[in-house]
Amino acid sequence: MKTIQTIFKWLTLTFFGITLFSITIGQILPIEFADWKDMHLFYDIIFQGLPITILLTMIWTIKKESPKRRKITIGILTPIIAFAAFFGTIFLMFSFGFGAWVNQEIVYENKANPQVTINEQIWDIGAFGYGGQRTVKLKPTLGLWNIVTEIDTTEIEKDNWTLVQREGDIKFP
């Protein structure tokens, strides 16, 4: 039983750490998922797993030697917190879960590394339409993420870039 408690303890703590990082510091880092489908899957797992993880904390917080009052308190508070986290994640889904930056047009490719591109992107909110535009330099990292840098195309060194003006993720008939 002690081994199972230890496993659940570290799994829940790791999940909490990833969740907190993703919805706080991870939002201000210039690293984004390269594919919006991967981003949505990641946030779906985070948001749907958070209440379950909170409930799993009961496995390692309630101990045999704990006083009865503490067991009752943990047994009551944990489901309440899980319920609140469930409804809190519904509101967070509107911030993180539905929108994604989508490449409208690939404007430039780097001559030295064609994987590095300058793209015009729009914020796609699905059924809610589009929410904004930006021009960014995307540098792929580890195949799953992009390092994103907002850029002004009038100030780039044109000798290092090839003008491609290729259609992005949004396909027009």
Image (cartoon, rainbow, N blue to C red):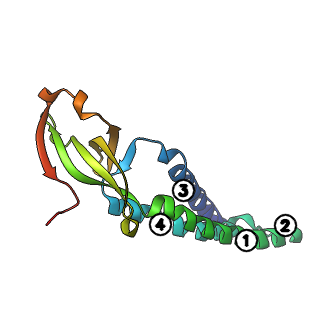
Mark 2: secondary structure: helix
Q: CA distance from mark 1 to mark 4?
A: 21 Å
97 to the left or right of 144: right
Task: List the residue tagged with mark 3.
Answer: 19
Which residue is located at x 55 percent, y 48 percent?
Answer: 24
Task: List the residue tagged with mark 2.
Answer: 70
Q: CA distance from mark 3 to mark 2?
A: 27 Å
Q: Where's residue 160, x and y in %? A: 14, 29
Mark 4: secondary structure: helix
Which residue is located at x 59 percent, y 63 percent?
Answer: 7
Report the amino acid beneath label 4. Ile
Q: Earlier in the sequence, mark 2 or mark 1?
A: 2
Answer whether labels 3 and 2 touch (C-beta < 8 Å).
Answer: no
Task: List the residue tagged with mark 1.
Answer: 80
Q: CA distance from mark 3 to mark 1?
A: 19 Å
Task: List the residue tagged with mark 4.
Answer: 45
Q: Where's residue 51, x and y in %? A: 61, 69
**Which of the 4 image quadrants contains residue 31?**
top left
Choose mark 3 or mark 2, whichever is in front: 3
64 to the left or right of 101: right
Q: Where's residue 14, x and y in %? A: 56, 55
